[in-house]
Each structure stands twice: as C-alpha cells, then as structure tokens.
Image (spheres, rainbow, N blue to C red):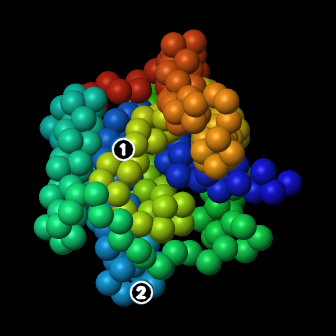
Amino acid sequence: MSWFIQVLFFSTPTGLAALGETVNQKAGQLNIGLEGMMLTAAYFGALGAEITGNPALGLLLGVLSVVPLWIIQNLLTIHARQDQVVVGTGINLAAIGITSTLFQQRYGDAGRLITIPTFARFGGLDALVFFMVVMAPVIWFALHRTAWGLAIRAAGEYPDSVESAGFSVAKLRWQASGIGASLAALAGAHLALSIGGTFVQEMTAGRGFVALAMVSFGRWKPFGVLGACLLVGFAEFLRFYFQVRQPIVPYQFFLALPYVLALVVLIIVGKGTSAPMDLGRPLRSNK
C-alpha cells in the first residue's frame, strides 16, 4: 500500500485546489486564477517557513498572501462584472511576475534552491493530506445537505431566482470563492512545504489548470473530483518513480502525463451537461 500513500501525497495540491474550485463553480464563479493563487501561496509559504523556522507559520502566511488576490478578483468579476477568464489570466501573470521578482531580489540566482522546514509526516502523510480527504465529504454535505449549500447551487444555476427569494448572489459568490481561494492557497503551500521542501520559480507548473480540468472530469461532484485528482496523483507518482528507475520509456513522457491527461479530459468531457448553467457569466445584480 506504500504506492497508494504516495498517490495520496502527490494528489494533495491538485485535490485541494479542485475541491475548492468545485464550491466556487457551483456558485457560478470560474477561477482561472487558481494557478496564480497557488504560486503566490507557495512562495510566501516557503518564505514564512524559512524566516520563522515553522512550517505552520509559513502555511498561515501563504494563505494570507492570497487574500488580496481574492479581493481584487471578486471586485472585478462580481461588482465590476468583468470577464472572469480575463481577470483570472491577469492574476496568473501577476503572480508569476511578483513571485519571480521577489525571489530574485531575496535570493539572487534564479536557479537557486532554498531549504525550508517541512511538515511532519505520519505514516508517510502530512496533515494536509488528511485534510484533503476529509474535505470531500464535508463539501458534499455542505452543498447537498444544508440550506447554505442549496443557496450556493441555486446561485450557479438560477441567480435571478435567488435574488427574488431575498438572497444576495454576490454575497454567496464571495463566500464560495473564499473557500476556493483558501483551498488553493493550502494547495500551493503544500507544494512548497511538503512535496518540494523548497520554492522554485513557477513551481506550480500548470497544476492550477489541471485542477480546473478535474472539476469537469469529476462532474462538479466532490467525490468524483477527488477521484479524478487521485488519477492525476497516480500520474505524478509514476513520474517520480520512473525518474529514479530510469525506464526504457523516457521519463519526460511521465513528466507530461498529468497535463496530457488534463487535456484529454477537456477534449472529451468539456463543460458537459452537469456544469452550473450560470458558470462564468457576469453577475446581473450585485446586491
């Protein structure tokens, strides 16, 4: 079962980001800026851990560093009604520029590896891995067995009806996107503070986009999304496994495998019939 433990471990960054994005998309918000949020949290999480010597404080700084991005994104998409894809792309580009500049100013050499304290592991897994597994049933219960979850799902399907019932779709989307941004931050911090044990420029390497694809693959259902992310984790496990074993097949094939998988998912699955009907559309009211 050691291989399954490794699969869970490597699934965690994508899994956390995708589970949070599931809530976000259920409310009608599409966060293309997942990649940038993860990268920002990875840098500041690593920085906080290096300065304090405590990965938990690094994790806290990583999460807090995403708050300004979350606020800017929602002000532009919910209240200014700007295109969600354009705003998310801007966040990704800004995150790459900011983290790369700050890294080079602090450490100089762009290729330098820094050593930071990492999370303790229990049976090969750290606390955030267990947190990811627990979040799947928690999110499912919140979305399908609570009045709040019903309102969130309605905000992504029939926002006009939600407004007519006296709820604020804007507030619901702020709440849902807050969950999505928080889990994206935890995902990025886990990448630096556990999997990598360091920070490298652009180290998220497209995982935010893979997480977006896994939400579609999992049909916007928490358990389906988690299962899809485990498949990505298995692909990442194979990459590291065969890098060491030096197989006949070039290891670059396994390096590209998670992204090829995400591309295939987008081609075959697409938005599908399960996507929230108002997903990605500008909010018509912002009460």
Identify whether 248 is placed above or below 183.
Answer: above
In depth, the one of 276 and 66 nearer the eye is 66
Residue 73 falls left or right of residue 225: left
Q: Secondary structure at mark 2?
A: loop
How far apart marks 2 and 1 lie (CA) works out to: 26 Å
| Residue depicted at 56% across the width and 75% down the height | 119
| Vertical position of residue 11 compared to residue 120: above or below | above
Residue 35, label in figure: 1
Question: Which quadrant of the figure contains the N terminus?
Answer: bottom right
**Point 69% across, 59% down: residue:** 134
* Quarter of the image where one finds residue 232: top right
Location of residue 76 with respect to 39 vertically, above or below: above
Of the pair 182 and 101, the residue shown nearer to us: 101
**Residue in view at x 81 percent, y 57 percent:** 2
Q: For this view, does 101 lie left or right of residue 18?
A: left
Q: Position of residue 186 (x, y in %)?
A: 47, 61
Give the amino acid at mark 2: Gly
Q: Is residue 192 visible?
A: yes
User: At x 53% / y 46%, what residue is drawn?
Assistant: 14
The image position of residue 25, as x and y in percent, is 46, 35
Residue 53's disc number: 2
